[in-house]
Amino acid sequence: MAKLTIEIPEELEELAYISKINWQLAIVRKLKEEFEELVRVKSIVSKSKLTQEQADELSEEVNSALAKRYEKLLKEE
Amino acid sequence: MLLVVDVNVVFSALINKGNAFKVFELNKSLDIFEFVVPEYLFLELGKRVDKLLLQSRLPKEELAEIFAFIKKQVNPISSLAFLDKLPEAIELNFKDSQYLALALKLDCGIFSGDKKLKKQDKVKVFSPKELLDMLEEKAKKSEENSVKEGKE
């Protein structure tokens, strides 16, 4: 099993003491959540059929719309 | 390091084996870059979701999960914060003026895969490959330090 050493800021230490936090459990749980999320999103992206050309076309549309929107806001100022 | 994010890399993050996604993925752990966007970016992106669903062939919930993952890493900035820089930005490039204005205001670079955006010298533009190289270099150094600390 890998071991991890971390530095806990003082303010967090006080909070943990009040809440009676189990550090081991809290950190392992948080790490598990983070890793599972990463694995999930990577898996989703690996299934995507979007091409660079399609991404560029969508970006052009969004950016043109944004530019017009902000120009309008500037004129209303 | 603060960077303005072009929607171009948000869409590119949906490309399988693309560098844009790897940047968001690695930055989640290494936290080197602080990303900001003009506040209406996700609103305009949202109007293209149907097209995106068709082209990516991803289920709606999974597309939503990717955007939630990216959104957690970017902070939207109100137009009030950078509108004064818009005239200058429009002179440089109208289509990308919102990013240029925000970058000029915050005195930072832009994260974009748009090669045309690099054709100005007022704001530094970083491609996905450039940011990925920086992240991988940092990851390598962190690993070397951990090995060194483990031996001490």
Image (cartoon, rainbow, N blue to C red):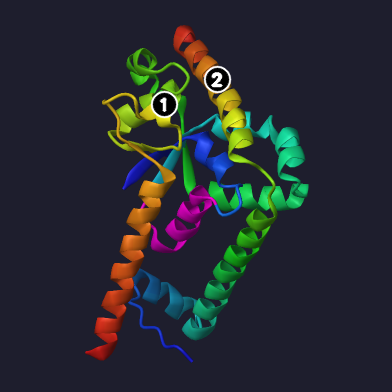
Secondary structure of residue under mark 1: helix
Please report the residue visible at 69 percent of the width from the left and 47 percent of the height from the top: A49
Task: Identify residue type, mark 1.
Answer: Lys
In the image, which residues are magenta? B18-33
What is the spatial separation of the Cα atoms under label 2 and label 1, in whole angstroms?
A: 14 Å
Specify few, some or many for label 2: CA neighbours under 10 Å numbering under 14, 14-19, or 20 or more. Answer: some
Compared with residue B104, is residue B129 higher up or lower down, i.e. above or below? below
Disc 1: which residue: B116
Secondary structure of residue under mark 2: helix
Compared with residue B94, is residue B103 higher up or lower down, i.e. above or below? below
Task: Identify residue type, mark 2.
Answer: Ser
Quarter residue B26 falls in: bottom left
Disc 2: which residue: A64
- Whole-percent x and y of residue B45? 62, 33
Q: Nearer the viewer, residue B139 or A10?
A: B139
Q: Are marks 2 and 1 in contact (CB under 8 Å)?
A: no
Q: Is residue A72 visible?
A: yes
Please report the residue visible at 39 percent of the width from the left and 62 percent of the height from the top: B30
- Whole-percent x and y of residue B14? 61, 47
Quarter residue A32 falls in: bottom right
Quarter residue B80 falls in: top left
Compared with residue B117, is residue B141 higher up or lower down, i.e. above or below? below
Please report the residue visible at 36 percent of the width from the left and 58 percent of the height from the top: B135
- Whole-percent x and y of residue A53? 60, 34
**Magenta residues: mostly which secondary structure?**
helix
Magenta segment includes B21 = yes
Mark 1 belongs to which subunit? B
Compared with residue B59, is residue B140 higher up or lower down, i.e. above or below? below
Magenta segment includes B141 = no
